[in-house]
Amino acid sequence: MANPETFSRPIRVPRVPWTDVAQGRAATPSAVSQSPQPRPSMNRRNIPARLAVLLAMGIATALAAEPKPTSEFTTTDPKKVKILEDSSREKNPGIDHFKHLCPGLGGYQVIHEGGDLRSWINLRFAGKTTDLQGATLAACPGQFPAKANDVVQWRGLRTGNDFEPYAIIYRMTSSADDAKQMPIETFIIIKLDKEKSRVVGQVPAKDGNAKAEVMADRLGR
């Protein structure tokens, strides 16, 4: 016969986590008395590496989105410009001379001007003309410097359909100041700064157009 005291003592029932009960797992002393210690997450360990990757991707995207220097071209071809003055249209001109209004970019107009076997370009912006004659002729070695062809190269940045020029490159030709008078060609570089635009450099044409572009990108921006 059972001892009556057995029924009077309180019975301790281990507390079983609800998840164990719901999933049909039996309670064990170890399961009840011990709680699992959290382990370091592998994701946390990889956070610095992931941040580095994201940063690198962001920098690469920004560099890809940054516009790079490029070129556009206009002309000084007399057949495609507005003739303001031209001695060829005069009956008895004292000397040869001309002034042609040529198309430009970025709000600039090009004035191709010349006389007495010399020629150069000036710029007009917002109705104001910048005189570049003296600086242009001084940048060319030899004598009788003149624009060598009809090309005007504009260096600038393109964003979508917009082109923002910051420099001009064009070719001049002159004659060596000696008995042979061999032709000398020079690239003239103009920094665009509205009415304060100015000649900032020259490159011998024999050194190549690429060198002129590098100088224009460095001095014009």
Image (cartoon, rainbow, N blue to C red):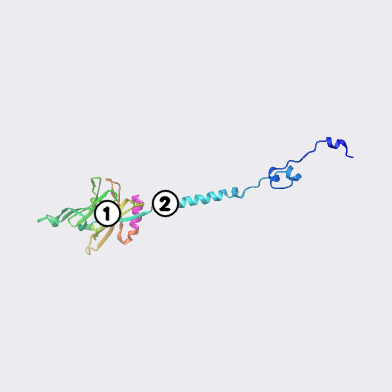
Q: Secondary structure at mark 2?
A: helix
Identify the residue at the far left of this view: 92
Q: Secondary structure at mark 1?
A: helix
Looking at the rendering, in which quadrant would you find the N terminus? top right
Name the residue tied to disc 2.
65
User: From where the camera sits, is residue 69 visible?
Assistant: yes
Q: Are marks 1 and 2 in contact (CB under 8 Å)?
A: no
Residues 159 and 130: in front is: 159
Residues 33 and 54: in front is: 33
* Majority secondary structure of magenta residues: helix
What residue do we see at 85% from left, 37% from top?
Answer: 6
Q: Is residue 214 magenta?
A: yes
Badge 2: few (under 14), some or many (20 or more) residues near its Cα, within 10 Å? Answer: few
Q: Is residue 156 above or below residue 5?
A: below
Name the residue tied to disc 1.
139
Direction from residue 107 to residue 59 in the image, left or right = right
